[in-house]
Image: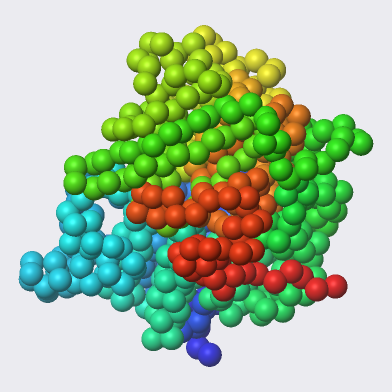
């Protein structure tokens, strides 16, 4: 197969620091998909952006060869690079939640590529935008095309970014975490769409921490760790019989099929993988592990445990749209209540009501037996530390002027101090972040690192309840496993209750005692997680579970 993209000896560094990508080589032919996997900070996204000339300010990109068809990507002019982007090389950005212009309707943003690179008239462009939104599974495409990014859920924004990237039918599509924010049914549709593009001749570089996505779409896979390739080859061979300890560890850390309360990552395996690559290891979440001999979680919170959150008849409208429709539930101390459903099902709106960020049109939320949602904010303020949050869009939740140290110090002190003390480093270590990030601003961290800062901020005041809105959706498999283990350990030792919202059914099943299945603002099914997953009663629940099983990655053999 003739290579459409040829990468030989690629190295990327920033300033005088060690390279973040070192001596990377791979190729992609027309109609071929190559997967790029590895932990957060391994160099995946930097590699993807380097191919477009977008590695970032202060970067130095070197390679013995970097070619797209007959174009030398290292030596092309800025004008030539701009012409290639969108028309010949499409790019699905990892940061879909903040990648769209907040001031313009998404239809105009998608239509810009058609306006700049084609001779289509306004009417033709509008028709093509609706066609693209339909292709990527956006419901009510005419309505959504006229909305701004802040009016769309995370999943809908992700699909709008994909629509924009494929608008011109590029020959090469660089997809950086294209399905991160999508529920299982929509993810299946997007992967089918990418498969059709591949079969039609589009070459795809698929960057993902989701090994199920890589196995479903990529014929070859490159495994990276700390800027270096540790293993590459045929996807099925690498994922089913990995040779490198780090690859094996990635596969074994997948939560699907793992019992509630069981560890996903054994720390001696972390040590083995680190030693195999001869690199220093960042502090891991094992610092929060319970003492030897501590009993594992039972997997079921006692039915007699105190109710920390009691939601009754929650209803919320936005204009003519009923976003939440008569939702009720109880969350007890030490319990995890999972909430699953497609993008736009009302999950995040429920979370905002529980956090008292949004007020319901009807219904109430009680916190530890006392009024919560019905109070004025001045009456809630003293109790705010009792309920924390981990948001899906971590970066937008931070003050961009603040360093990581100030963010965590502020959370630890309840807003009384922004000066980092020793407790800041200890809190960051609990989520696997080194002291070196204290002086950095979150926008300079990888997506996975940003999410870990958000989790550290949430646990800092030791709340009774944490509302987790897609808390691990941007994390690679290994870091996701470490964070899930950490959340389990904190729950076991401190009795924290989690309202756990996720599109990843494997994560929800591993973490939850009970589960709610939502669609169009209503709860369609509820019950103990194993009962719902093993014997779903509602057709929609069965559809969700079937879609998730269709993308499941098998465990490594041997």
Work out which quarter of the rendered image holds the C terminus and state it.
bottom right
In the displayed structure image, the side of residue 359 where residue 544 appears, left or right: right
Look at 62% across and 40% down and name the residue there: 336
Up/down of 132 relative to 142, above or below: below
- 357 horizontally vs 434: left or right: left
Q: How does the figure colour the protein chain or chains? A: rainbow
Task: Depth check: give the residue in front, 253 or 386.
Answer: 386
Q: Can residue 524 be seen in this view?
A: yes
**Total numbered circles:** 0
Q: Where is residue 311 in the image (x, y as percent from the top left)?
A: 46, 33
| Left-right relation of 348 to 268 | left
Q: Can residue 282 be seen in this view?
A: no
Residue sitting at x 66%, y 43%: 483
The image shows residue 471, relative to residue 5, as above or below, that is above
Image location (x, y in percent) of residue 353: 40, 32
Residue at point 36%, 32% (across, down): 363
Find the residue positioned furthest to the bottom: 1
Q: Percent from the top left, x then y, of residue 452?
A: 59, 38
Q: Relative to 503, does residue 239 appear above or below in the rendering?
A: below
Q: Position of residue 142 (x, y in %)?
A: 18, 62
> In the displayed structure, would residue 107 be above or below residue 485?
below
Which sits in the foreground, 524 or 446?
524
What residue is at 61 percent from the left and 60 percent from the top?
Answer: 533
Left/right of residue 344 with respect to residue 513 in the rendered view: left
């Amino acid at each position: 197969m003739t290579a459409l993209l040829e990468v030989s000896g690629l190295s990327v560094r920033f300033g005088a620091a060690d390279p973040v990508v070192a001596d990377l080589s791979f190729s992609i032919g027309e109609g071929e998909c190559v997967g790029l996997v590895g932990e957060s900070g391994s160099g995946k996204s930097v590699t993807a952006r380097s191919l477009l000339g977008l590695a970032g300010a202060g970067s130095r990109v070197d390679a013995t060869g970097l070619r797209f068809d007959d174009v030398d990507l290292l030596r092309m002019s800025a004008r030539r690079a701009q012409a290639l982007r969108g028309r010949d090389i499409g790019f699905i950005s990892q940061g879909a939640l903040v990648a769209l212009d907040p001031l313009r309707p998404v239809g105009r943003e998608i239509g810009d590529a058609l306006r700049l690179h084609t001779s289509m008239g306004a009417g033709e462009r509008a028709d093509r935008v609706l066609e693209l939104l339909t292709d990527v599974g956006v419901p009510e495409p005419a309505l959504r095309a006229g909305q701004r990014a802040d009016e769309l859920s995370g999943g809908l924004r992700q699909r709008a970014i994909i629509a924009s990237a494929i608008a011109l039918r590029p020959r090469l599509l660089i997809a950086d975490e294209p399905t991160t924010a999508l529920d299982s049914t929509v993810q299946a549709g997007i992967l089918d769409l990418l498969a059709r593009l591949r079969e039609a001749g589009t070459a795809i570089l698929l960057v993902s921490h989701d090994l199920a996505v890589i196995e479903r779409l990529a014929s070859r896979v490159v495994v990276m760790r700390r800027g270096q390739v540790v293993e590459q080859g045929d996807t099925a061979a690498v994922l089913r019989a990995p040779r490198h300890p780090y690859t094996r560890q990635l596969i074994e850390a997948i939560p699907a099929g793992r019992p509630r309360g069981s560890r996903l990552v054994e720390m001696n395996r972390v040590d083995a993988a680190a030693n195999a690559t001869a690199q220093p290891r960042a502090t891991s979440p094992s610092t929060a592990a319970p003492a030897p001999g501590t009993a594992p979680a039972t997997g079921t919170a006692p039915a007699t445990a105190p109710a920390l959150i009691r939601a009754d008849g929650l209803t919320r409208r936005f204009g003519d749209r009923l976003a939440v429709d008569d939702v009720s539930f109880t969350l007890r101390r030490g319990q995890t209540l999972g909430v699953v459903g497609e993008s736009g099902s009302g999950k995040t709106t429920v979370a905002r009501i529980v956090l008292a960020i949004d007020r319901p049109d009807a219904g109430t939320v009680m916190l530890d037996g006392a009024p919560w949602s019905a109070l004025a904010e001045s009456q809630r303020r003293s109790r705010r530390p009792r309920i924390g949050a981990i948001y899906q869009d971590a970066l937008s939740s931070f003050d961009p002027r603040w360093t990581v140290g100030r963010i965590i110090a502020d959370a630890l002190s309840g807003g009384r101090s922004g000066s980092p003390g020793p407790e800041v480093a200890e809190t960051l270590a609990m989520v696997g972040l080194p002291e070196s990030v204290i002086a950095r601003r979150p926008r300079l961290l990888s997506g996975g690192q940003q999410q870990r800062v958000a989790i550290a901020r949430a646990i800092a005041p030791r709340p009774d309840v944490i509302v987790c809105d897609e808390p691990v959706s941007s994390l690679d498999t290994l870091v996701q496993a470490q964070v899930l283990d950490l959340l389990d350990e904190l729950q076991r030792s401190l009795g924290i209750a989690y309202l756990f919202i996720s599109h990843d059914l494997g994560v929800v099943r591993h973490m939850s005692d009970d589960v709610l299945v939502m669609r169009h603002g209503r709860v369609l099914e509820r019950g103990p997680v194993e009962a719902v997953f093993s014997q779903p009663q509602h057709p929609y629940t069965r559809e969700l579970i079937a879609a998730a099983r269709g993308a499941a990655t098998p465990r490594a053999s041997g």
